[in-house]
Amino acid sequence: MTKIITAALLLCSIIPQMAACQNSGDAISNINLQLQQGKTTITKILSSDSLMNLHSLTAFREVIKANAKAEKIKIVTEKEPGTRITVNGMVVNKKGEPQKNVLIYFYHTSDKGWYSDTGVHILMNSGDFNHARLFGYLKTNEQGEFTFETIRPSGYPKSDFAGHIHLQFWNKDMRTLHGPGELQFDEDPRMTPARRARSQADGYLISKNSGTAESMVYVYKIIVE
């Protein structure tokens, strides 16, 4: 709780008109107001060191979700360990038609394979899905495209799972759309032939880096229904 209050107080000093912040609830309310008024961005919020301790809170995540739009976002701080990657995607239906205004939720582990700062998995209600530290919400544009910047996640320690990014999709009416549950990476050292075959059987998408070794770019074509 001390860390959350500290983050809230730091927030007051870095975002205009937040001097009245007293606790995490106030901080989150003010983040929402600033986003609604266009005075800050989801990238600035999610890539702020001082706000990282708010990421596991449901109210904070709901604010990010409610203010998601079609824009490129960054979800990691400059201090986050790991190789920087850019994920470019296009969402289409079974006919290949671009799907605009699709809300996308994504989350993943850190460079050491952890969802939280203190352990591999989050042992609380809904666990990793609702509380993973590295997460984001965005929407597809008119061409069904989206882009976000993060680090390439690692697989869980003491397992053979390859690194992956979890996904969930909703249409403009907030109906859940069915699509691939994970994005994976061809260069992952755990991407053995057996793991690749299993991932493909599960409907996961695997992409090769089309950028550089220091700044990787992965492109995915996502079919939803």
Image: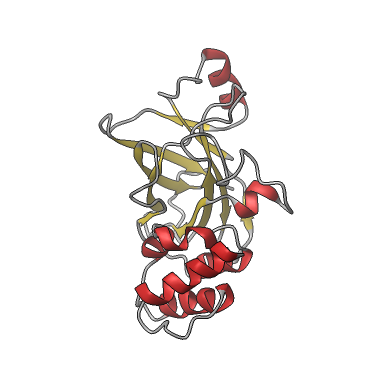
| Placement of 126 over or under 66, stated as above or below | above
**Residue 34 located left or right of residue 6:** left
| Placement of 94 over or under 162, stated as above or below | below
Colour approach in the figure: secondary structure
| Placement of 86 over or under 209, stated as above or below | below
State the residue at coordinates (58%, 50%): 132
Q: Position of residue 47 (x, y in %)?
A: 39, 57
Q: Which quadrant would residue 158 be assigned to in this image? A: top right
Q: Position of residue 1 (x, y in %)?
A: 62, 64
Q: Position of residue 16 (x, y in %)?
A: 35, 80
Q: Is residue 97 visible?
A: yes
Q: Which quadrant would residue 17 be assigned to in this image? A: bottom left
Query: Which sits in the foreground, 162 or 105?
Result: 162
State the residue at coordinates (54%, 70%): 5
Q: Position of residue 35 (x, y in %)?
A: 42, 74
**Residue 160 located left or right of residue 205:** right
Query: Which sits in the foreground, 101 or 50?
Result: 50
| Placement of 177 over or under 24, stated as above or below | above
Query: Which sits in the foreground, 74 or 225?
Result: 74
